[in-house]
Image (tube, helix red, strand yellow):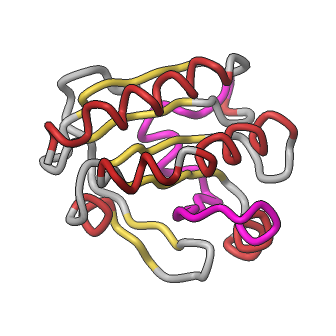
Amino acid sequence: MFEKGDHAPEFSLPDQDGREVSLTSLLNQGPLLLYFYPADFTPGCTRQACMIAELQSDIQRSRLMVAGISPQAPSVHQRFRAQYKLPYTLLSDETKEVIRMYGADGPLGFGVRRVSYLLDRARIVRDVVRADFRISRHTQFVRYSIAVAESLR
């Protein structure tokens, strides 16, 4: 798992439409809130995804990019995104390679931990929050990320 000040490694994963998206391409647009979550359509993950969507006007105003990563297929992400009107990218890591690389793999390799990273354009981890069950901590982290995003451009 990465800590504040670490350099985030490059990756490329398919998005909800099956297009390959790299970390660099996301960061070319500005600082990034990169969050890992267990599964689409589960109560906690749906709550977290919708919370981020509710803050979309503030996210856009701060020019913060958002991308979520979980192990579901792009087609599942596409349905999840459409059903809940999620305005941000969802990336599919079916092999959990990036999930493991970013320290979000669950205990003994089962499941996915709920981890959020704030990355600047140079791929430096500016902050991180780990809270598997306390979605309110992720809500606070999103608000914090919005507040500092402008200084990271």
User: Camera-side residue: 74 or 146?
Assistant: 146
User: Camera-side residue: 1 or 84?
Assistant: 84
Residue at 67% from the left image edge and 46% from the top image edge: 49
Question: Does residue 96 show up magenta in the picture?
Answer: yes
Residue 42 sits above or below residue 106 on the image: below
Horizontal and vertical percent position of residue 45: 75, 40
Q: State left or right for residue 8 relative to residue 57.
A: left
Q: State left or right for residue 138 relative to residue 78.
A: left
Q: Quadrant of the N terminus?
A: top left
Quarter of the figure with residue 15 = bottom right
Question: Does residue 103 show up magenta in the picture?
Answer: yes
Magenta range is: 81-108
Total labels: the figure holds 0
Horizontal and vertical percent position of residue 110: 74, 33
Residue at 32% from the left image edge and 59% from the top image edge: 23
Residue at 76% from the left image edge and 47% from the top image edge: 39
Horizontal and vertical percent position of residue 8: 26, 41
Horizontal and vertical percent position of residue 136: 64, 20
Residue at 78% from the left image edge and 45% from the top image edge: 46
User: Camera-side residue: 6 or 81?
Assistant: 81
